[in-house]
Amino acid sequence: MQVKKVLAVAVLGSALAGCQTTDPYTGEAEATNSTKYGLGGVLAGAAIGALADGGEGAWKGALIGGAAGAGYGHYTDTQEAKLRTELRGTSVQVKRQGNDLTLIMPGNITFETSRADIKSSFYPVLTSLTKVFKEFNQNLVQVVGYTDSTGGDSINYPLSQNRANSVAQYFINQGVPGSRINSVGRGSQNPIASNKSKEGRAMNRRVEINLLPPPAKS
């Protein structure tokens, strides 16, 4: 009986390890985040369970740890895939670091120069995002406005804050709970390109949306 349980843990780990995707640029197989977290959960759960209850505890711990780890990673994997589908062809970038997703919206397609009113042509993109935010309703939504370095802080900070507020208010008006949304303007901080060129300044004028995990319950 004990051997069967050990083999079952191994099978669970192998099944998760088999969940891989192929990098479209390198052609290399890589584990999805749900696989990484799932395998980590299996090993951690098995170790804790073994200490608590020998082989029986290892079996239970592996199942619980694997399910919890894979579940959280799978949530983010699925959300990322949905966002990439919705935003294809819109010039909005989707970036991921760990379980944090960031959407980068270039200022030239979002706002007129020196204005904080959203371009009506960008409404459909924000409406698509609203749909995803409602479907994946566990994330906190942080909207951050940025400018280039021209004009000085006295202009850039209020402009970046007003632009972030405009995007955040759009989501709220479309039914995303305001309790999930925070907006902040950071002026010319954190440039992603050189402000010495026209192209670089255009890249720095942007709004970023950070999709963050909900705070842990105490």
Image (spheres, rainbow, N blue to C red):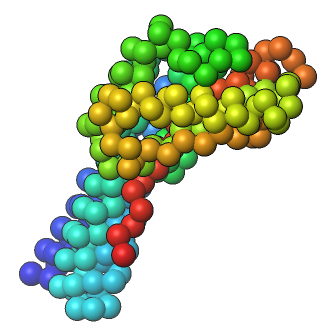
**Residue, x 67% and y 32% (percent of image)?**
160
Viewer-proximal residue among 127 and 183: 183
Residue 150, picture quadrant: top right
Query: Residue 36: horizontal and vertical position, in percent?
Result: 41, 55
**Residue, x 43% and y 15% (percent of image)?**
123
**Residue, x 64% and y 12% (percent of image)?**
112
The N terminus, quarter of image: bottom left
Asked if residue 84 lies left or right of residue 188, the reply is left
Asked if residue 43 lies left or right of residue 4, the reply is right
Viewer-proximal residue among 9 and 104: 104
Residue 205 seen: yes
Residue 154, picture quadrant: top right
Extreme residue in the left direction: 1
Residue 78 seen: no
Query: Residue 45: horizontal and vertical position, in percent?
Result: 31, 75
**Residue, x 33% and y 37% (percent of image)?**
176
Extreme residue in the top direction: 121
Asked if residue 12 lies left or right of residue 169, the reply is left
Residue 156, picture quadrant: top right
Query: Residue 35: horizontal and vertical position, in percent?
Result: 36, 52
Viewer-proximal residue among 32 and 98: 98
Query: Residue 66: horizontal and vertical position, in percent?
Result: 28, 64
Asked if residue 23 lies left or right of residue 179, the reply is right
The C terminus, quarter of image: bottom left
Report the number of discs.
0
Above or below for 7 versus 95: below
